[in-house]
Amino acid sequence: MGLDLTLFMADWEQLGAIPVENRIEALGDMAWPWELDDACHLRYGRARGWLWPPDPGSAWCAEYDFFTTTGSYRPHACAGAAWADIRLLVDLSVREAMDAFLEGLIWDVDPAEDRGLTGGGGFFPPAADRRHPRVLLVCPPEAASHKAHAWKQVQPRLEELRGPFAAECESWAGRPDTFEDFTALLREWGDVTTETARRGWGLVGLP
């Protein structure tokens, strides 16, 4: 997988006011000028966490730079594959909450129904439109709120995943290297969805 993941938290109302065919470009335009601005050289030094544009008038979205990855989509895909491997081995209540948390972010119960492939139900151009890159994930505000709630249920029970992870994923290619790597990435997604839900915003992942 040679894809990168550029993750945005966005005010859905303001993003929705942009014509649908221009929304991906608008998010991309928000990201690249930050790297070229003298006030934002921290990004070249691998600044992490939420990166806000220097113009307060453009603060309707922010990019999230993961602490536990280098920007590649691969660690997220590996974590999603790990969950697919172990989910039937965990307690039902944990499984249901984790499914609700991860589905549409880094795991899909049915990959054929991946919302990124359809532009998030029409909020973005479909992947078949070659003028636009495929959207990797679309998480509207209502979904972000549900995921933040699911994360609250899952977070205190992450240790219950250790045994299933050791049995099904440890030392397997295409899976996180360690249980600690796996849960560190889950915790970042938990932080991301919690902050997004707090603002009443949504998430968009671009390659």
Image: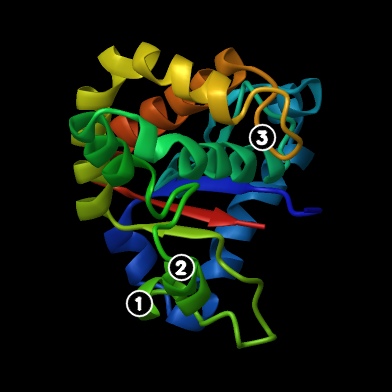
Q: Residue 110: which numbered mark, if any? A: none
Residue 34 lies, in percent from the top left, at: 67, 40
Q: Give amino acid for label 2.
A: Asp
Q: Give amino acid for label 1.
A: Gly
Q: Give amino acid for label 3.
A: Arg
The residue where tag 2 is placed is 114
Count residues near mark 3 (Cα–Cα under 10 Å), then give few for <14, some for 14-19, many for 20+: many
In the visual, does 11 lie left or right of 179?
left
Residue 37 lies, in percent from the top left, at: 73, 37
Q: What's the residue at 45%, 39% (across, down)?
A: 56
Q: Nearer the viewer, residue 69 or 48?
A: 69
| Between marks 1 and 3 in the image, the one whose residue lies nearer the viewer | 3
C-alpha gap between disc 1 and disc 3: 30 Å
The residue where tag 1 is placed is 121
Q: How is the image coloured?
A: rainbow
Residues at badges 3 and 2 in contact (C-beta under 8 Å)? no
